[in-house]
Structures are given as structure tokens and as C-alpha cells.
Image: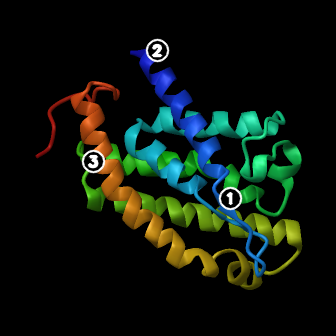
Amino acid sequence: MKTKNLALAAVFTALTAVFAQIMIPLPFTPVPFSMSVFAVYLTGALLPAGWAAGAQAAYLLLGAAGLPVFGGFSGGLGVLAGPTGGYLLVYPLMAAAVAAAAHAPRRRTVPVLAAGMLCALAVCYLGGSLWYCASAGVDWKKSAALTVLPFVPFDLLKIALCAPFAAALGRALEKARLLPQRDGPKVK
């Protein structure tokens, strides 16, 4: 089972790198619109918390080592230390938050996944905006206006799309026995 978990974690690491390339720079904010968070949500929705966090930590390590896995095919410690580094650095926490919600009731329902994704989004906003405060030397109010508020509608749309997709994908992958088995009886 460890080999299967390792392979799944690697797939989600790669998926995050691919989704990170789907980005649109915005003229009014230093933070681009990116689909990488969608991959982080999927990672948490489908893997146990430890493996989900590990997959996202591996993504960060690959990028920190200089591989071009971050948005715009960038990599290196400079990206993590830059103004948007805080958003990236919380990916393992975000994936673990979604996984905790997805695995706590022992069933991946859309409302449960959406709640976990909302918690993860709060972690993303907090980590990213506070990091931007420190790196750009601005107060939190200005940071939130530049790096959080413009993204709320788009991020809520990502959750609205990802939660039902992850629930359906989870059912299909469990039926095919491609996901790690859950222990104990399933809650109905």
C-alpha cells in the first residue's frame, strides 16, 4: 500500500505543477490568478492528510530546488521568498485541511469537501496576505485589498467546481481501488 500512496502523492505533485501553469497575471495586483489551488484542493480531497501534505511539500521542494514547477515555469528560492511565496508555502497546510475534512466523516460528500476547501482557502488567504505584508512592507489592510479581495469570487467558483468533481472522482477511484483504503466502517 505504501507504493500506491507514494505513486498517488507523486501524481498530485505533478498535477499541481501542471495546474500552476494555468495562470493569468493581473495588472491591479502582484498575485496572478492561478489554478494551482484547484490541484491542492484535489490533493486534499483524495489523499489522507499526511500524504496530501507530503505531496504539496514535495511540490515546494522541487520548486525550491530550481525546477520550473511554479507559475510561469519558474522555480527557485527567490519565488518562495518573493511577494507571493506565502501562498505557496501554505499548500501543505491547505491540503491537510481539506484531507482532514474529507476523511473525518469517512465520506466525501460535496458539502464536507466544500467546507474543507473553505477552511483551506482561509489558510491560503491568511498565509499569503501576511507574507505579502512582510515582503512588501505594507499593512494588512492594504495587503488584503491587493491580494485577497480581488480573488474571493474566483476562489469561491473554484470551490463550487472542485467539490463536486472531487466527490465524483473520489467515488470512481475508490470503486477502482486506486485510492488508499479507509479503515473501519463507512458512515452513510
Q: Mark 1: which amino acid?
A: Tyr
Label 3 to label 1: alpha-carbon separation: 27 Å
Gap between marks 3 and 2 measured at Cα = 24 Å
- Classify mark 1: helix, strand or loop: helix
Residue beneath the point at 85% across and 53% down: 81
Q: Quadrant of the N terminus?
A: top left
First in residue order: circle 3 vs circle 1 = 1
Residue receiving disc 2: 3
Residue 104 seen: no
Helix, strand or loop at label 2? It is helix
Q: Residue 115 vs residue 86: left or right? A: left
Left/right of residue 181 with respect to residue 131 in the rendered view: left
At horizontal 73% and vertical 58% (from top left) the residue drawn is 86
Amino acid type, residue under disc 3 in the picture: Ala
Nearer-N-terminus badge (3/2): 2
- Quadrant for residue 186, please give it: top left
Badge 3 vs badge 1, beta-carbon distance below 8 Å: no
Label disc, if present, on residue 168 of the rendered structure: 3
Residue 159, x across and y down, in percent: 42, 64
Residue tagged 1: 87
Residue at image position (14%, 33%) is 185
Marks 2 & 1, CB-CB < 8 Å contact? no
Give the mark toward the camera: 3 or 2: 3
Looking at marks 2 and 1 on the same chain, the residue that comes earlier in the sequence is marked by 2
